[in-house]
Image (spheres, rainbow, N blue to C red):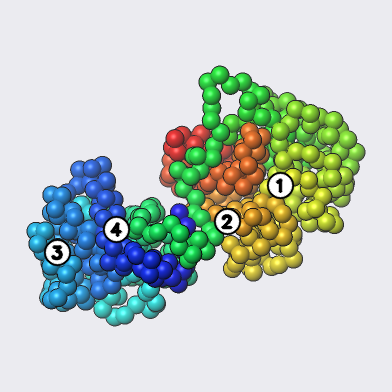
Amino acid sequence: MKLAAVSQMRAIEKEADSKGVSYAQMMENAGRGLADIADMLGAEGGWKTVTGIVGSGNNGGDTLIALSRLAEAGWRTHAYLVNRKTAGDPLVTRYLKSGGDVTQFSSDTNFESLQEFLEDSDLLLDGLLGTGVKLPLKEEAALFLTGLTLILDMLEAPPFVVAVDCPSGVDCDTGACADETLRADLTATMAAAKQGLLKLPAFERIGELELVDIGLPPNLDALKSLDTDVADAASVSAMLPERNPASHKGTFGAAFVAAGSTSYTGAALLAGKAAYRIGAGLVTMAVPESLHAALAGHLPEATWVLLQHEHGFISEQACRHVLTNLDRATAALIGPGLGDKHTTKLFIEQLLPKLELPAVFDADGLRHLAGIQDWSEKIKQCAVLTPHPGEMSAMTGLSSSEIQLNRNEIAGKFAKEWGHVVVLKGAFTVVAAPDGRKTVIPVATAALARAGTGDVLAGLIVGLRAQGVGAYESALAGAYIHGQAGLRAAEIYGTTASILASDVLDFVPDAIARME
């Protein structure tokens, strides 16, 4: 699924129209796709009654086409028109011929008919306002949405709400929402996800996000110009290594994790466990010798390399010991919980030009990189860097606020400049590759706002790299699975406040299983 600004989507549709796929045909395809989603939901829920809110624009047209198709398929349908005339409208005429009924908002005193329809309906299609809306809303739209929301709130069993392209009241570029914006259970986005849908507060109103194919020609220049994808289960599942029954531990690689310090003992443990949970065949933990007794009993599956240290922090002298223990490793993670001691920076500085493995750098490892001259050139293979905005600030010299305002652009710019994959963590994590590819992870949840969740993510990524998955694909898949595990943990516990990093780790298997 591609991510598009509203202006980009208009350019795509204009070019498609010029190359033989008319606006009318695109609308027909959108309506058919919307009806298919309704049919799928109906089959799952045993639903057969739908009300469509029909505005004056293209979203209203999509909705009328979907209602016509659903009526022909045996659904009981209601079209509720808001500021849309019936006379001379071929889509209204078509819908009436299919056996549906039409009610005008202007003649519905006190929303009485609308309330009757909603009490009768299993499904509500929100086709009132489209992607071009600007805030604040016009008085009539605001009045209608306020009344609609009040009715839905009163119902014991309100219908399932499907937004047509976007929930009515969302600015699809900025993600701003009118106070009256209708909350959807699912948003059926046409051709591409609109960029505002993956911004707050709009993201909280869209529910599940599902793409509808509107039949665009594949060779459109405007479509090719879209440079950002939105991760989904199908694309991520295709990136995961196959698990052949005849495999052995060597089949799935060996992750080498250099992590931990007296101050951050648990970071190493979370990263090592995550590497195993994502499927690595062997995990070797390289930690300060003083941590071994505390950690070994919690990760009996690992092998251990005990490193020289100064007061529990990896020392410069440990570099040689690490290099002599990399013969079996297929990927390395450097950083979780290392701390900020100068001796550890010297350890990393010595290691960089001698490290022949695919590498992942996280947390304190990134902060130490920022202090090493020409660090990006000293890393021999394309590495994965996993900064949060504060770490990205240390690495770039930009402020965290500037980074947050331009997440996609900044992640892409520095991935290209450094020659390494950047995973800019946070709400809507951005994964960017040096070749220009970018993907947004459609997750924003307080369940991941906890110390240690970044260590879990780093472990997932190195576990995939160890199995031979590419740098960009490992970063993308690891970030997506990490987000889904956090969401699932919050769902099971019923709150985001109580989720620990270890809970996110525990739900990684569930997240993977749900994609299969």
- Answer left or right for 282 relative to 203: right
Q: Do the residues labelled 3 and 4 touch (CB within 8 Å)?
A: no
Query: Given the current orientation, which residue lies at the most extreme bottom position?
Result: 139
Give the residue drawn at x 60%, y 43%: 474
Is tag 2's residue or tag 1's residue first in the polypeptide sequence? 1
- What is the spatial separation of the Cα atoms under label 3 and label 2, in whole angstroms? 42 Å
Q: Nearer the viewer, mark 3 or mark 2?
A: 3
Label 1 sits on residue: 383
N-terminal of the pair, mark 3 or mark 4, is 4
Q: Name the residue under label 3.
A: 94
* Residue 29: mark: 4
N-terminal of the pair, mark 3 or mark 1, is 3
Q: Position of residue 476 (x, y in %)?
A: 57, 47
Residue 438: numbered disc: 2
Q: In which quarter of the image is the C terminus?
A: top left
Task: Give the distance between the C-alpha atoms of the residues marked 4 and 1, in whole angstroms.
Answer: 42 Å
Dot 2: what SS?
strand
Q: Examine the image and state in which quarter residue 17 appears.
A: bottom left
Residue drawn at the location 48% of the way across and 45% of the way down:
235
- Which amino acid, mark 2? Lys
- Front tag of 4 and 2: 4
